[in-house]
Image (tube, rainbow, N blue to C red):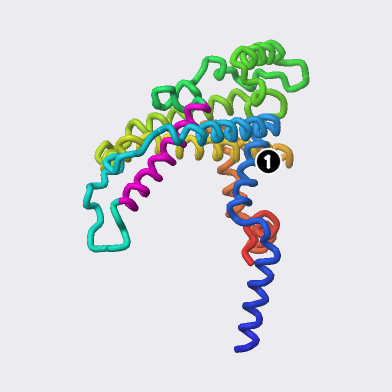
């Protein structure tokens, strides 16, 4: 028993010593690296700066919003009775705290143009554009073919002022990827609008912010999944693995399926080694 206790204590001590970077920070690093690998380090750094600036600006204006009534959260005056440790003041502070966070988030999203000034979802931000219809098969591969299409696409990138993430060795340099992302974002808006009214209007707070929450959760998932598929596709190409995308929406969906197939087809030994080097290491 003493041996077991000592082993557990040693394991706990080892975990504390080896995990100076907490899980939440590690997750943020993974998401940042995904963003940088997908869109480029320059864009990722500028994106972080814009978020920080918007956050600081909105924090300064939070105090000007005024007190928020409990009714916004749907809390009646006698919301909680029979518990002497909770007062009406506590209820007010709780409601105002949640509303302050929601209003601050809304402010940041307006600053970043995800929302319009009136607080509506800015669906035009990721709107589908004609230039996304360029066929990448006609783009130049360095052999001299497709130079005209290359020039047209480059001109479109400059016109839409998206060269910071749509040129060079970036996902945005592929119009197929940009089209995929744009269509996916559009589906997020459609999803938020189609979400059942009975579910989204269960209380005043959800009625005000529910569809917005559905949309923002969706576009974050779409971007991360799209970037992950882009990286998978690029890595497979770098390792000389060809994927037949016939029957798929695009080569990126096909690459994701190929990665899943490779994992399932791998032996227990190879998957164990792969998990050690590239998976989460729990100690």
Identify the residue position indicated by label 1 in the image: 236
Residue 109 forms part of the magenta stretch: yes
- Nearest the eye: 139 or 115: 115
- Horizontal and vertical percent for residue 146? 70, 15
Q: Which residues are magenta?
A: 89-112
- Residue 148 seen by the camera: yes
Residue in the image at 63% along x and 37% along y: 35
Q: Which residue sits furthest right? A: 143
At numbered mark 1, what does the secondary structure look like: helix, strand or loop? helix
- Horizontal and vertical percent for residue 77? 22, 48
Quadrant of residue 199 in the image?
top left
Report crowding for label 1: few under 14, some 14 to 19, many 20 or more residues within 10 A (C-alpha).
some
Residue in the image at 58% along x and 49% along y: 261
As drawn, 45 above or below 152: below
Residue 152 forms part of the magenta stretch: no
Quadrant of residue 47 in the image?
top right
Q: Which residue sits furthest bottom? A: 1
- Horizontal and vertical percent for residue 182? 51, 26
Q: Main secondary structure of the magenta part?
A: helix
Position of 113 with respect to 214 (left or right) is right
Residue in the image at 37% along x and 33% along y: 192
Q: Quadrant of the N terminus?
A: bottom right
- Residue 173 seen by the camera: no
């Amino acid at each position: 028993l003493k041996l077991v206790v000592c082993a557990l204590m040693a394991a706990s001590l080892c975990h504390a010593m080896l995990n100076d970077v907490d899980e939440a920070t590690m997750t943020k690093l993974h998401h940042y690296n995904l963003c940088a690998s997908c869109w480029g380090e320059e864009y990722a750094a500028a994106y972080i700066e814009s978020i920080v600036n918007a956050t600081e600006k909105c924090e300064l204006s939070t105090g000007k919003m005024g007190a928020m009534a409990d009714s916004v959260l749907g809390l009646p005056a006698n919301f909680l009775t029979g518990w002497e440790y909770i007062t009406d003041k506590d209820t007010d502070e709780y409601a105002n705290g949640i509303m302050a966070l929601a209003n601050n988030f809304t402010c940041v999203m307006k600053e970043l143009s995800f929302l319009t000034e009136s607080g509506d979802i800015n669906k035009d931000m990721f709107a589908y554009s004609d230039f996304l219809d360029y066929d990448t098969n006609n783009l130049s591969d360095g052999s001299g073919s497709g130079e005209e299409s290359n020039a047209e696409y480059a001109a479109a990138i400059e016109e839409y002022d998206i060269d910071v993430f749509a040129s060079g060795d970036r996902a945005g340099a592929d119009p197929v990827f940009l089209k995929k992302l744009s269509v996916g974002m559009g589906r997020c808006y459609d999803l938020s609008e189609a979400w059942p009214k009975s579910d989204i209007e269960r209380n005043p707070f959800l009625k005000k912010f529910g569809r917005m929450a559905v949309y923002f959760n969706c576009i974050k998932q779409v971007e991360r999944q799209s970037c992950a598929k882009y990286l998978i596709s690029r890595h497979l190409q770098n390792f000389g693995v060809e994927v037949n995308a016939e029957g798929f929406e695009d080569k990126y969906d096909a690459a994701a399926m190929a990665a899943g197939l490779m994992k399932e087809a791998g032996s227990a030994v190879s998957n164990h080694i792969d998990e050690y080097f590239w998976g989460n290491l729990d100690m």
